[in-house]
Image: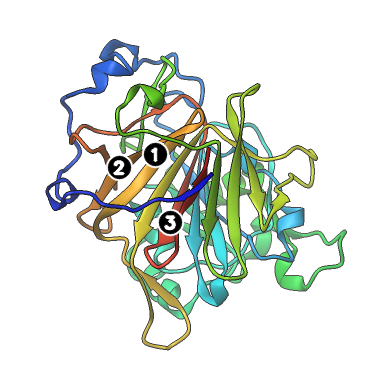
Amino acid sequence: MKKVLCLCVLSFFLFTGCKKEEKTMEKIEEKENITEKITIMDLESKTRPIAVVINNSTAAVKVQTGLEKAYLVYEIPVEGGLTRLLAFYKDVENITIGTIRSARHNFLDYVLEQDALFVCYGWSRYAKKDMTSIGLDYINGVVNATAFWRYNPEKLATEHTAYTSIEKIKEYAKEKNFSTETSQSNLLKYSEKEILLNQLKNSEKASEVFIPSSNTSSTAYKYDEEIKKYKRFVNQKENIDYETKQQFTAKNIIIQKINTKIASDNYYWDLETIGSGEGFYITNGFAVPITWKKTSRNEKTCYNYLDGSELVVNDGNTYIQLQSTKQALKFKE
């Protein structure tokens, strides 16, 4: 039976920062299991992440390529009731990534907090102002297209045809003398030991997750017990990698509920990503409520369990779904 979850979290927890100490998490993981044995990434690596804006429009979803190699992907609301993806890569072999689209200013909040090299093809007026004034290292196809190429096997409009690769990004970064290392710590804390949320008293069964972004656009996940991951769907259709023909999956899903409004030009969206709010952490067929807090643009977003302890996620890739508080999140058992 489908449930519409009421997000009711005490305001006390909305202002709880990232905690180093563990509280009730002994129930589902042990501190010594947070080790270098994690496979999603090398926790000791100082390689600078690469953040890429990926097209998620209805026309271009069918040609999406390279998402499965990202360790972290944000799905972010944009104008027109649509969303775009911001995919983060680190220490991966050369892969094709696409299609690449333009930046929005709120995307930078997540690029800056992780000290990532930013890759896009175009920008909104607000993103352009920020990107050119804050000293951000970026690769933008409208400024210099050498890191990109066009490919259009499905005869789509030109804006849906730009691709890049890890190799080309690195080549361009070298030409521009962009730093390839970072001292920034990882955004999320990973557990080598499998986290089973059903052991927590406030857990909900979540075999299926439905995340609408508008009346015409939605994302869904269905848990596959055999592979212990969620399979991803866009507008009720399987989300398939165009190159590998494999369906995209997620080990972890974070729902981050945010307030949204229209910018002063009455067109672009302005998302309230600085502040605090509520959400859910979802893995292995279950969900638990969490809180989030971000104190400034450059500071990391902190995700906490309701007891105030820092969120710990399973070893695997993560999708962070930014969803408007005006939209209902639905789980199915």
Q: Quadrant of residue 60?
A: bottom right
Which residue in the rendered view is the most extreme toward the top?
32
In the picture, measured across the screen, residue 154 lies left or right of residue 55, that is right
Q: Earlier in the sequence, mark 2 or mark 1?
A: 1
How far apart marks 2 and 3 lie (CA) works out to: 14 Å
In terms of secondary structure, where does tag 1 sit?
A: strand
Residues at discs 2 and 3 in contact (Cβ within 8 Å): no
Residue type at numbered disc 1: Tyr
Instruction: State whether residue 268 is above or below residue 77.
Output: below
Q: Earlier in the sequence, mark 3 or mark 1?
A: 1
Q: Earlier in the sequence, mark 2 or mark 3?
A: 2
Residue type at numbered disc 2: Ile
Q: What residue is drawn where x is 20% and y is 23%?
A: 24
Q: What residue is drawn where x is 71% and y is 57%?
A: 61
Q: Quadrant of residue 134?
A: bottom left
Instruction: State whether residue 236 is above or below residue 47.
Output: below
Query: What residue would you read off at disc 3?
Result: 322
Query: What residue would you read off at disc 2?
Result: 290
Instruction: State whether residue 197 is above or below residue 56.
Output: above
Say few, some or many: other residues with alpha carbon within 10 Å of mark 3 (under 14 / 14 to 19 / 20 or more): many
Which residue in the rendered view is the most extreme toward the left?
12
Q: What residue is drawn where x is 76% and y is 54%?
A: 63
Q: Which quarter of the figure is the N terminus placed in?
A: top right
**Relative to the observer, which residue lies in front, 92 or 175?**
92
How far apart marks 2 and 1 lie (CA) works out to: 6 Å
Say few, some or many: other residues with alpha carbon within 10 Å of mark 2 (under 14 / 14 to 19 / 20 or more): many
Residue 238's disc number: none
Q: Nearer the viewer, mark 3 or mark 1?
A: 1
Which residue in the rendered view is the most extreme toward the front?
1
How far apart marks 3 and 1 lie (CA) works out to: 12 Å
Query: What residue would you read off at disc 1?
Result: 281
